[in-house]
């Protein structure tokens, strides 16, 4: 089975035959497909859920990084700027 890793900073996608212990310990690499995420139901495996406007800035930073923004860039923005950038719910809710 193939494991597919995605770099949240660069968007680079790498398919590997086995889990990579080096990539597993790095914060910016996530397994986006493979045996473990496939066991989880749909959207949850795509990353964290979009936070509400009432959630703290850390939740918005985590969400921005999961959407591909560099963590340093996300931390440099205010919570209001993160909400402006990533606040629109793609499902039309909220």
Image: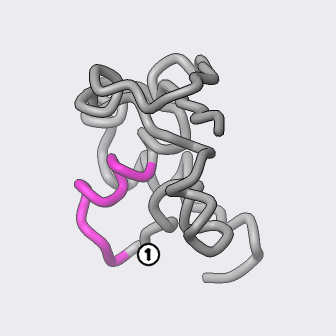
On the rendered structure, is 35 left or right of 54? Answer: right
Up/down of 14 relative to 85, above or below: above
Up/down of 28 relative to 82, above or below: above
Q: For the N terminus, which image quadrant?
A: top right
Give the quadrant of residue 70. top left
The residue sitting at 42% across, 39% down in the picture is: 65
Up/down of 48 relative to 12, above or below: below
Dot 1 falls on a residue whose secondary structure is loop
Q: Position of residue 53 (x, y in %)?
A: 41, 72
The residue sitting at 33% across, 77% down in the picture is: 54
Pick the residue in front: 22 or 30: 22
Q: Which residue is mark 1?
A: 52
Give the quadrant of residue 71. top left
Give the quadrant of residue 25. top left
On the rendered structure, is 65 left or right of 55? Answer: right
On the rendered structure, is 2 left or right of 56? Answer: right
Pick the residue in front: 51 or 30: 30
- Please state the extent of the stretch shown in magenta in the rendering: 54-63
Q: Position of residue 12 (x, y in %)?
A: 59, 17
Q: Position of residue 35 (x, y in %)?
A: 57, 53
Q: Is residue 59 magenta?
A: yes
Q: For the C terminus, which image quadrant?
A: bottom right
Pick the residue in front: 44 or 1: 1
On the rendered structure, is 58 left or right of 94? Answer: left
């Amino acid at each position: 089975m193939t494991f597919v890793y995605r770099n949240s900073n660069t968007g680079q996608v790498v398919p590997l035959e086995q889990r990579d212990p080096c990539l597993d310990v790095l914060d910016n690499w996530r397994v986006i497909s493979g045996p473990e995420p496939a066991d989880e139901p749909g959207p949850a495996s795509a990353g964290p859920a979009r936070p509400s406007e009432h959630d703290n800035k850390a939740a918005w930073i985590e969400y921005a990084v999961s959407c591909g923004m560099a963590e340093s860039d996300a931390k440099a923005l205010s919570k209001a700027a993160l909400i402006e950038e990533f606040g629109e719910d793609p499902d039309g809710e909220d």
